Image (cartoon, coloured by chain):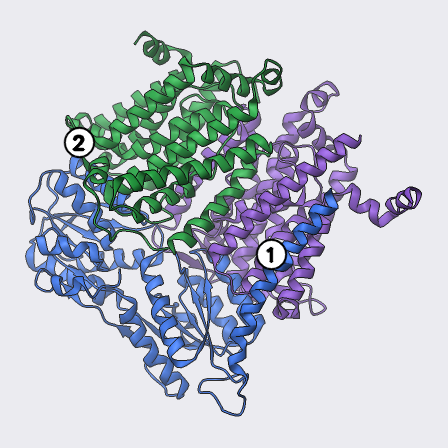
């Protein structure tokens, strides 16, 4: 009985693995034409292979959008795209980096690190293996910078947080009370954004009542904001570090009986859902952050890498500020 | 014919497979499948990477095996790893590598001992006790990492980065994580097999009342098992930090669940009283090999999770059936 | 009512109630009267309603001496399915509950019929559900369809000033309290948890009870998933991750024993409310979630310790 089960299991395993193997082979065949030298092919296997080591390709809309755009580019230009999904976990990503290096078939790595401090080690490993790296969205810190070809990403401080912060600085005088709705505690993006908000407001004399971490859940933002509105009667404005939390916050504000504009809400990372709220005046301002913004820039960078041009280290992708004026127009253009 | 079959059954190799858990067959099959599935799998660089991961995560699993042996469970391991790692990096940057190493290991033992005390002195079931510790440690880790997502090790050892030492190779293949894991396996395996306390641990998990009547101090051994668990967690965290040269707030996430799955796949019983170092490391190897080959085949994490889950459930079912057969035969 | 009084006064939940009172006193002392406003109480109850719906059902699982760790991804799965069908309430709730029952019954099959260790089996199914959910939703959060009015009412409506999620929570609490205390089925659940072997000899089909209990938890999770989606009309597949530990905390705080045979739904409700008060109270005081985590751990330890002390210190 035991042996029968063992054999059945063995067959299942072999079947599962070989069915995957078929796919892998098919992907490899496009590199047969060896005479034609392929642009960007460093290791000489006749095909330009780029590994996209992503923080995640399933857990958040923005990385998913980047992947979709990247895949479209790769299909169009016949790049071989190897996708690694880090699932938001440092250990997984560390193993994937080791895996990419040991495979030795990759010409260029595009790295969206889970953690920018750990990325320094990844970049060092890649540079020892002779593979060039482009980092996106979270920059590696000073030490590893000289080994990265380029950093492509949004300007977290001036590009994403800036418009909202400037709007607030224009409209509110010292002594105003505000709360920040943030994402996961201790996650890179949100730490940078929170620090940027604080930096903008250092001299403004605003009172920060609370910073609330909402994970990635609109529901948590809604509950946290409801509790905050009970605890503090005099909130003047809310700074949400993503539209996910702005939407949760707005729902709580509506329910507490405020009118549009009573409490100013500024945000970033525009969602389709929030366009309605922007038009109605619940959210005063938000900034787009889409895969298209980033991919346009990233493609340019990859072309200049292929041509071996030297370019500036930092290449910023640009977002658009959305207010009540242009919300209707963006409603159809946003990817998520 | 029957005599022949009996003879075949009594050959040492077959007896080994019959008497031990079906895991050995499983792992051979999986390795064969892996080799046939992906040529990338057999590259020497990959084999070293793979065995390094087995070593690093194996240490955590070794600690967990002891906790399972005495019939406990530790849910707080993930955040123990995160806390040990975070403090290790903080101390490394201020007081240097070796003092930090020493303090971290002591800290690991202390947290483990605390868990043991909660279970034995406060008489709280280990599932709930360690759940409480887990929640508290999570808060602590987040407070320590409030201003940064990850903290780089700025200190160097003999003029080199820490990650250099993780990948340093003796005889071309033996890295520190291999060596440490082998030392742990051999030392703790000997402890379990030859030392009185080690042998008694099986009694504590398998039949605590019998242990009580034969004069075994159940509580002391339970505390000892949890302390070993904490010690192993701190060692694992140091290796993880060395590999990445950083600590992050979520560096322990999933490690505990992977360790639990690995150990169980290896055949260690969660109810206590059954298990040894060989089972533990074979289980870790199985899970890590499956993960490695799935990465090599370019499977997405969602698919990997699904397959890991199915493997765990299948192994459990297989184990159940074989133990039923054994029981019927006896 | 007298039963309720007995429960509150009795030893069983004394520790939790005492700590709750102390904590509320601290919150009120530090933050003024805002804790006892109707609005705040409603907020507090609404914020734990999703967890509460699940906790009631999990109490039954725990009473049989089992555990379910797969709930976090199960609720994500159900919520995503609700989202996919959010145009039509009937379809949404049907598919969500069906998915929940399917997942729950699978757990029940593994634990009840195949008699696998509940902890490990549900850890395995957790991985499996994680994979299924992420593959099914492709990781996207579901939010775009125009939601049906009924669904909106389920998540955001009010009946006589009380938010609907709280009413659903209350309904589930009553149903499960009734099931566990007043029916033959409930007696059997206790019997299975107290001693499976003697339950078997007295003619109770333990496997069936366990299967039903897990399926009920699946059903509750389906409803909870629908409520979770409907509250903000948006959900991410992983938004339930970690919820299983909160549920476990609440159920255990309520005096349910992890080894089975002991526990009640009223206690669970107290536990759920306590977990809500911790988070809400710290917001009112102005402290962050990190403090909540630390306190929640300590509170759980103290409550368990008090529980063990009062029950004579029998170690399982």
Q: Nearer the viewer, residue B65 or A59?
A: A59
Q: Secondary structure at mark 2?
A: strand
Direction from residue A182 to residue A149 in the image, left or right: right
Location of residue B269 in the rendering, given as x and y in whole percent from the top left corner? 65, 36
Q: Nearer the viewer, residue B131 or B265?
A: B265
Look at the picture and state if A114 lies above or below B213. below
Count residues near mark 2 (Cα–Cα under 10 Å), then give few for <14, some for 14-19, many for 20+. Answer: some
Q: Residue at x 67, y 65 (%)?
A: B35
The residue to which callout 1 is attached is B290
Quarter of the figure that contains the N terminus of chain B: top right
Location of residue B322 in the rendering, given as x and y in whole percent from the top left corner? 71, 38
Look at the picture and state if B262 lies above or below A168. above
Quarter of the figure that contains the C terminus of chain B: top right
Direction from residue B143 to residue A226 in the image, left or right: left
The chain displayed green equals C
Location of residue A141 in the rendering, given as x and y in whole percent from the top left corner? 39, 67
- Residue C158 marker: 2
The chain displayed purple equals B
């Amino acid at each position: 009985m035991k042996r029968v089960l063992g054999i059945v299991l063995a067959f299942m395993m072999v079947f599962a693995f070989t069915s995957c193997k078929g796919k892998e082979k098919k992907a490899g065949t496009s590199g047969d034409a060896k005479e034609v030298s392929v642009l960007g092919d460093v290791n000489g296997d006749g095909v330009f292979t780029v590994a996209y080591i992503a923080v995640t390709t399933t857990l958040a809309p923005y990385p998913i959008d980047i992947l979709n755009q990247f895949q479209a580019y790769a299909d169009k230009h016949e790049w071989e795209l190897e996708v690694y999904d880090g699932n938001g976990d440092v250990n997984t990503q560390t193993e994937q980096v080791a895996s990419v290096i040991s495979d030795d078939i990759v010409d260029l790595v595009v790295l969206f690190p889970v953690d920018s401090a750990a990325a320094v080690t990844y970049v060092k490993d890649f540079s020892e293996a002779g593979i060039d790296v482009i980092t996106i969205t979270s920059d590696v810190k000073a030490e590893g910078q000289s080994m990265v070809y380029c950093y492509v990403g949004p300007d977290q401080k001036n590009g994403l947080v800036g418009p909202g912060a400037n709007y607030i600085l224009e409209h509110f005088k010292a002594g105003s009370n505000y709360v920040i709705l943030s994402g996961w505690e201790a996650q890179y993006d949100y730490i940078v954004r929170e620090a940027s908000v604080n930096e903008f407001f250092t001299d403004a004399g605003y009172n920060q009542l609370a910073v609330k971490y909402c994970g990635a859940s609109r529901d948590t933002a809604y509950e946290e904001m409801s509790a905050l509105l009970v605890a503090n009667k005099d909130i003047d404005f809310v700074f949400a570090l993503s539209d996910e939390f702005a939407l949760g916050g707005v729902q709580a504000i509506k329910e507490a009986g405020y009118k549009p504009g009573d409490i100013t809400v500024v945000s970033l990372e525009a969602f389709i859902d929030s366009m309605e709220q922007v038009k109605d005046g619940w959210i005063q301002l938000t900034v787009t952050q889409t895969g298209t913004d980033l991919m346009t820039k990233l493609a340019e960078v990859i072309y200049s890498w292929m041509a071996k041009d030297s370019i500036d280290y930092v290449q910023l992708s640009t977002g658009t500020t959305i207010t009540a004026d242009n919300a209707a127009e963006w409603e159809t253009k946003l990817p998520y | 014919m029957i005599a022949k079959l009996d003879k075949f059954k009594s050959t040492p190799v077959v007896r080994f497979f019959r008497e031990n858990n079906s895991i050995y067959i499983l792992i051979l099959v999986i390795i064969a499948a892996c080799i046939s599935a992906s040529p990338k799998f057999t590259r020497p660089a990959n084999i070293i990477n793979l065995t390094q991961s087995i070593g690093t995560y194996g240490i955590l699993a070794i600690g967990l095996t002891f906790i399972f042996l005495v019939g406990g469970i530790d849910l707080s391991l993930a955040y123990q790893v995160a806390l040990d790692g975070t403090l290790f990096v903080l101390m490394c940057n201020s007081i240097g590598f070796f003092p930090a190493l020493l303090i971290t290991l002591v800290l690991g033992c202390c947290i483990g001992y605390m868990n043991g005390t909660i279970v034995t002195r406060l008489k709280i079931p280990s599932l709930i006790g360690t759940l409480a510790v887990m929640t508290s440690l999570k808060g602590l880790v987040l407070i320590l990492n409030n201003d940064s997502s990850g903290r780089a090790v700025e200190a160097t050892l003999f003029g080199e980065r820490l990650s250099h030492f993780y990948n340093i190779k003796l005889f071309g293949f033996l890295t520190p994580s291999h060596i440490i894991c082998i030392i742990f396996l051999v030392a703790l395996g000997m402890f379990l097999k030859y030392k009185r306390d080690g042998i008694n641990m099986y009694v504590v998990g398998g039949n605590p009342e019998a242990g009580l009547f034969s004069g075994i101090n159940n509580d002391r051994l339970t505390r000892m098992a949890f302390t070993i668990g904490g010690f192993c967690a701190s060692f694992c965290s140091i290796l993880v930090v060395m590999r990445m040269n950083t600590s992050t707030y979520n560096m322990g996430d999933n490690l505990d669940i992977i360790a639990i799955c690995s150990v169980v796949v290896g055949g260690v019983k969660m109810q206590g009283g059954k298990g040894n170092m060989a089972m533990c490391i074979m289980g870790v190897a199985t899970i890590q090999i499956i993960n490695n080959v799935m990465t090599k085949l370019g499977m997405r994490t969602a698919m990997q999770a699904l397959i890991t889950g199915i493997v765990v459930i299948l192994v459990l079912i297989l184990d159940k059936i074989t133990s039923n057969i054994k029981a019927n035969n006896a | 009512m007298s039963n309720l009084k007995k429960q509150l006064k009795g030893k069983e939940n004394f520790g939790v109630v005492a700590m709750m009172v102390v904590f509320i006193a601290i919150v009120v002392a530090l933050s003024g009267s805002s804790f006892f406003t109707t609005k705040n109480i409603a907020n507090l109850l609404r914020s734990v309603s999703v967890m509460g719906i699940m906790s009631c059902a999990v109490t039954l699982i725990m009473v049989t001496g089992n555990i379910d760790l797969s709930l976090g991804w199960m609720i994500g799965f159900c919520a995503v399915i609700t989202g996919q069908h959010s145009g039509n309430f009937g379809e949404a709730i049907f598919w969500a509950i069906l998915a929940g029952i399917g997942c729950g019954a699978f757990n029940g099959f593994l634990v009840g019929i195949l008699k696998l260790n509940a902890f490990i089996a549900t850890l395995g199914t957790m991985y499996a559900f994680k994979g299924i959910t992420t593959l099914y939703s492709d990781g996207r959060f579901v939010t775009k369809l125009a939601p049906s009015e009924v669904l909106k009412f389920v998540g955001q409506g009010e009946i006589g000033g009380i938010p609907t999620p709280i009413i659903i929570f209350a309904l589930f609490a009553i149903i499960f309290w009734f099931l566990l205390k007043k029916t033959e089925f409930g007696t059997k659940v206790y019997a299975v948890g107290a001693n499976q072997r003697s339950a078997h000899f007295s003619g109770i089909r333990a496997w069936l009870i366990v299967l039903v209990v897990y399926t009920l938890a699946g059903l509750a999770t389906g409803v909870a998933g629908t409520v979770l989606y409907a509250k903000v009309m948006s959900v991410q597949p992983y938004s339930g991750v970690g919820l299983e530990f909160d549920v476990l905390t609440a159920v255990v705080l309520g005096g349910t024993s992890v080894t089975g045979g002991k526990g009640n739904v009223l206690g669970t409700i107290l536990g759920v409310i306590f977990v809500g008060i911790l988070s809400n109270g710290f917001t009112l005081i102005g402290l962050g979630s990190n403090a909540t985590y630390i306190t929640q751990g300590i509170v759980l330890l103290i409550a368990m310790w008090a529980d063990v002390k009062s029950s004579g210190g029998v170690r399982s």
